[in-house]
């Protein structure tokens, strides 16, 4: 009976850890042409043989830390402030991620493609500054999740994960963005709303984007190296918001 319980526990652990192993092995498999084949009958003995082959590889990958997802360990979950901090870091051209202005450029390019009235701002972004949770233009009532200051534009990014926007929140942000634009002498004052749910009657000056849009952009980043691994992990993490 004890042996049966041990086998059941091993099977449960394998079921929990096998997906992580398969995700780790996927990039190593490369691309192969599909071939026609017949699915053989799978006998319990054959399953046992396959398990004996897979388990050592699985244990090696597990002990090497291939299943680590730092964002899960950091407890980002659905917390807007924590996810905003990571997103702001990835958007910052001076961020230690090493991607430069790539994410910011791709986000602005997508907004420009989606909204013809938006200016094209996907060039000369290496000197922009990115600040999270700021009170712009001396405002004591409007706290912006992410503020991006470029040479000729001011961009506020408001993020929502499970909540909806407040009453007239986006209209107020548009006014504050315009006020900051005038104070700083910039050409454009813009607002980007990042959420899983479309806002109610948003102002024309607001561009809408989903977390899946950002995840799709990040999925195109190189996957090698430490920065590639954690970037892809963040992409997987924010896909869960939908």
Image (cartoon, rainbow, N blue to C red):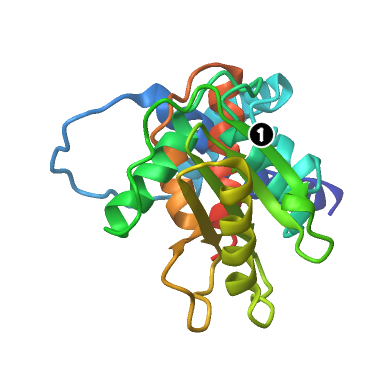
Residue occupying image coordinates x 79% and y 53% = 138
Q: How far across and how far down the image is residue 26, in percent?
A: 43, 32
Q: Is residue 29 left or right of residue 136?
A: left
Any part of residue 135 in sight: no
The image quadrant where one finds the N terminus is bottom right
In the displayed structure, 33 sits above or below 205; it is above
User: Splitting the image into 4 quarters, where does residue 80 fall?
Assistant: bottom right
Viewer can see residue 42: yes
Is the residue 218 above or below the residue 83 in the image? Answer: above
Residue 128 left/right relative to 210: right
Residue 213 position within the rendered picture, expressed as x and y whole percent measured from the top left: 43, 53
Task: From the image, tell me which residue sits under label 1.
Answer: 89
Residue 34, position in %: x, y? 17, 37
Camera-side residue: 213 or 67? 213
Q: Residue at x 40, y 39 (%)?
A: 106
Q: Nearer the viewer, residue 61 or 98?
A: 98
- Label 1: state its secondary structure: helix
Q: Residue at x 41, y 22 (%)?
A: 28
Q: Position of residue 116 (x, y in %)?
A: 26, 58
User: How many numbered discs sit on the rendered protein?
Assistant: 1
Name the side, left or right, on which 136 lies relative to 148. right
Query: Toward the viewer: 187 or 241?
Result: 187
Q: Quadrant of residue 163?
A: bottom right
Position of residue 75 relative to residue 150, above or below, is below
Work out whether residue 180 or residue 226 is closer to the camera in this orientation and state it: 180
- Examine the rendered structure and indicate whether residue 103 appears above or below residue 29: below
Looking at the image, which residue is at 62% across and 21% down? 94
Would you call the spot at circle 1 few (<14 residues within 10 Å), some (14-19), or many (20 or more)?
A: some
């Amino acid at each position: 009976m004890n042996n049966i319980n041990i086998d059941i526990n091993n099977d449960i652990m394998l079921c929990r850890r096998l997906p992580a192993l398969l995700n780790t092995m996927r990039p190593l498999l490369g691309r192969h042409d599909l071939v026609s084949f017949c699915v053989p009958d799978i006998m319990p003995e054959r399953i046992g043989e396959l398990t004996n082959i897979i388990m050592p590889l699985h244990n090696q990958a597990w002990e090497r830390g291939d299943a680590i997802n730092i964002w899960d360990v950091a407890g980002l979950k659905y917390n807007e402030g924590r996810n905003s901090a990571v997103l702001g870091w990835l958007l910052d051209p001076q961020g230690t991620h090493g991607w430069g202005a790539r994410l910011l450029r791709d986000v602005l390019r997508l907004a420009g493609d989606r909204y013809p009235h938006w200016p094209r701002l996907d060039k000369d972004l290496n000197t922009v500054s990115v600040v999270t949770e700021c009170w712009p233009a001396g405002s004591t009532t409007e706290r912006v999740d992410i503020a991006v200051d470029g040479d000729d534009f001011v961009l506020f990014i408001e993020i929502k994960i499970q909540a909806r926007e407040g009453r007239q929140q986006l209209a107020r942000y548009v006014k504050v963005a315009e006020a900051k634009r005038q104070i700083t002498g910039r050409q454009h004052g813009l607002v980007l709303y990042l959420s899983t749910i479309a806002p109610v009657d948003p102002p024309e000056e607001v561009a809408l984007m989903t977390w899946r849009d950002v995840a799709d952009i990040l999925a195109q980043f190189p996957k090698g190296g430490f920065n590639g691994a954690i970037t892809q992990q963040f992409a997987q993490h924010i896909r869960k918001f939908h």
